[in-house]
Image (cartoon, grey):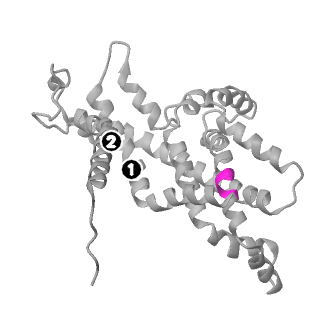
Amino acid sequence: MKEKQTYDRKDYITACIAVILTLLFLFPVYWMIVTSLKPMGELFANPPHYIPQQLTFRSYIDNFIKNRSMLGYMANSFIIAAGTMALTLLLAAPAAYGLARLPIRGKAAILILLLATQMLPSIMLAMPLFIVFSKMQLINSFTALITANTTHSLPFAILVLRPYFLSVPGGLEEAALIDGSNKFSAFWRIVLPLVRPGLMTVGAFSFLWGWGDFLFALTLTSKESIRPLTMGLYKFIGQYGTEWNNLMAVATMAAVPIIVIFIVLQKYIVGGLTGGAMKD
């Protein structure tokens, strides 16, 4: 018979503190959703209504049914985020494998350089990339935005994936080579499946970086047909005021993919980050 678990006073206090902190962190999300559902007259009530007295879905209807321009922005964001994720994984996996397995001279310096690159603010990369892409005539293209976002996510991806490749026993690859596989086949069929949690962690964060990018989109695009949802949100902030209910409605829809990704991949994201840290 399973023994009943008991909790002491310290456990209850810890649980209460955790609940309070969680509610505090989630309050901005709650306020965003509530604001999107309030009529205009209730937005500026004093004192503010923490629970809306009247609900309306007009902001969602106006921005996603009557006027479907926001759907175009969302499609652009999805293309940019998915492209950033794919390109990051394509480049990061062999790079991290090489840094983990091959006897590369100056490996420590490369890792420090990657770490330093990760710390650079995006604004320091935006202007040089604008000059490069201008000369290559890639301004106002998904290629420019995907490449720019990848420069930001790639160092993080390599640093997270390298410990995973280090944890894979080299004997598995040697056994595959003895069985007739070549180096690429052993990497693709044996090594990559074993580092799947790390790949899913890196893929999720790369997607989110591409989805939430604003600075590169502002710098490298001027056509509305290319711009992502973050630029679409900016349209509700005008010189004479902000359309808070429309802004919050679109922001709520923009947050949905992020919430879904974290819920679905929660165990991989948490396990991937902590697992990679322990294996290095």
- Residues 27 and 262: in front is 27
Please rate how many residues cluster around mark 1, counting C-alpha atoms within 10 Å: few if below 14, some from 14 to 19, many from 20. Answer: few
Q: Nearer the viewer, mark 2 or mark 1?
A: 2
Quarter of the rendering occupied by the C terminus:
bottom right
- Check disc 1 and report the residue beneath it: 259
Quadrant position of residue 25: top left
Residue at 15 percent of width and 25 percent of height = 42
- Residues 111 and 59: in front is 111
Residue 11: percent from the left, percent from the top?
A: 30, 55
Q: Helix, strand, or loop for circle 1?
A: helix
Residue at 30 percent of width and 52 percent of height = 10
The magenta segment? 158-162
Secondary structure mostly seen in magenta is helix
Q: Is residue 140 magenta?
A: no
Residue 65: percent from the left, percent from the top?
A: 27, 42
Residue at 33 percent of width and 12 percent of height = 240
Q: Up-down: is 78 above or below 25? A: below
- Check disc 2 and report the residue beneath it: 21
Quarter of the rendering occupied by the N terminus:
bottom left
Q: Up-down: is 75 above or below 40? A: below
Q: Is residue 197 left or right of residue 108?
A: left
Residue at 65 percent of width and 32 percent of height = 139
Q: Up-down: is 107 above or below 218? A: below
Label 2 or label 1, whichever comes before in sequence order: 2
**Whole-number angstrom distance, CA of label 2 to CA of label 1:** 19 Å
